[in-house]
Amino acid sequence: MGASELYFDNNATTPLDEEVLGAVTQALAENYGNPASRHPRGEAALRAVEEARAAVARLVGARTPDEIVFTSGGTESIHTALFFALARHGGGLVLTSAVEHPAVLRPLERWQERGFEVRQIGVDPEGRLSIDELLDTLAGGRDVRLVSLLLANNETGVLLTNDELARIASAARRVGALVHLDAIQAPGKHPLENALRNADFASLSAHKFHGPKGVGALFVRTGLEHPRPGLLIGGPQEDERRAGTSNVPGIVGMGRAAERAHDFVQGAGIARLAALRDRLEREIVAGVRHTRVHGESAPRLPNTTNIGFPGVDGELLHLSLAAEGLCVSGGSACSSRSQRPSPVLLAMGVGEKEARATVRFSLSRRTTPEEIDQAVEVVLRVVGQLAGLSASAAEPS
């Protein structure tokens, strides 16, 4: 990253932590054994994998490390959870929300082709899930197989609270449905222990909390019927839940990243992040008229703010901010090159034009007060220039 760049796109991906880089480099150089091999090199690799599994288990509050299955990333973890929950059924109802990530919504389209009905529960203008609608649907008792929900929205940061999760889990269990949480945005920003007590599955991705790309994990609650492998079939790795030679360096990196994220959340990290986020919001809102913080009154991740700039051309806004070295996004990184407005904001009732003129700022534990001040200065200058252009264009010739 260049010296002039300001990185505020940490919900898309985070920079690799220095300690994680050291652990991965050491594993690449020294821990090259196959964990399935029964000789000293293999045993050393196996110990490294199991130490990482224990670290991820601590991060999420798992009852035992055996509840952690390593995968190639968040998308595979989500697909695996859906397979484990649905493959044994010939049909039924799956409940999700209108603001889920495409990594959930698109595979659910495939499950619809297999005979499942997928129902998206709506959200209010602040992005909060309609809990009553979800609970009423569960109470209908129509062979609900799975409830799959974002723990923390990647675009707005809006959270499901522990109380909401407890109510959802209780209602799901009454009708025999399983609960999957897309928890990918939460590690290192939100305590996971209580949330995962109300989940049967939860998906994680290392690169969202300063770990390496290409490695993730799936939490699978103890007591579920042993799921058979579905996506990757072959060897007996991961207790026969995910075949393939273990990515030892990636797993080691995820374990070290999990330790660092756990320490940050257990300390004063969340309060510090929230204070920086609030400062960024406050100064932008004070300096730009008619701005709107989407999800402002809802429980949110401490690092995320989604700010709309009505009256400004959205494409020009993002191009201009990028030209000034400010790395931000308009929503999900997976859809950032699409010209379509954010489906999340549209589901919240935001108009298409305003949805295009929205910026997501996502901080990390590396973000400094000085970077906040610099980002504010860039935003105020750029928006002021674009607003001036808009006013000039609107004047009669």
Image: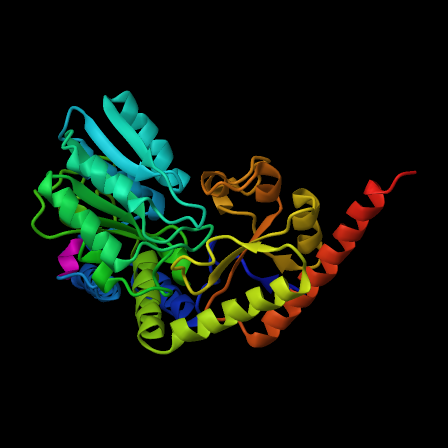
Question: How many numbered markers are drawn?
Answer: 0
What kind of colouring is applied to the model shown? rainbow
Query: 275 or 134: nearer the eye?
Result: 134
Q: What is the residue that sits farthest to the right in this orientation?
A: 397
Q: Residue furthest bottom?
A: 268
The span picked out in magenta is: 64-68
| Left or right: where 282 falls relative to 244 | right
Q: Is residue 276 visible?
A: yes
State the image quarter where residue 249 is shown.
Answer: bottom left
Q: Which of the 4 quarters of the picture holds residue 226?
A: top left
Report if residue 211 is visible in the image: no
Looking at the image, residue 368 lies above or below residue 391:
below
Taken as a whole, is the magenta stretch helix, strand or loop? helix
Residue in the image at 35% along x and 58% along y: 186
Of residues 160 and 63, the one drawn nearer to the viewer in this rendering: 160
Where 295 sits versus 92, above or below?
A: below
- The residue under the point 36% across, 61% down is 28
Q: Position of residue 273 (x, y in %)?
A: 45, 70
Comparing 126 with 99, the one in front is 126
Is 187 on the left-hand or right-hand side of 310?
left
Q: Quadrant of residue 159?
A: bottom left
Q: Quadrant of the C terminus?
A: top right
Give above or below for 114 relative to 18: above
Q: Percent position (x, y) of residue 65? A: 16, 60
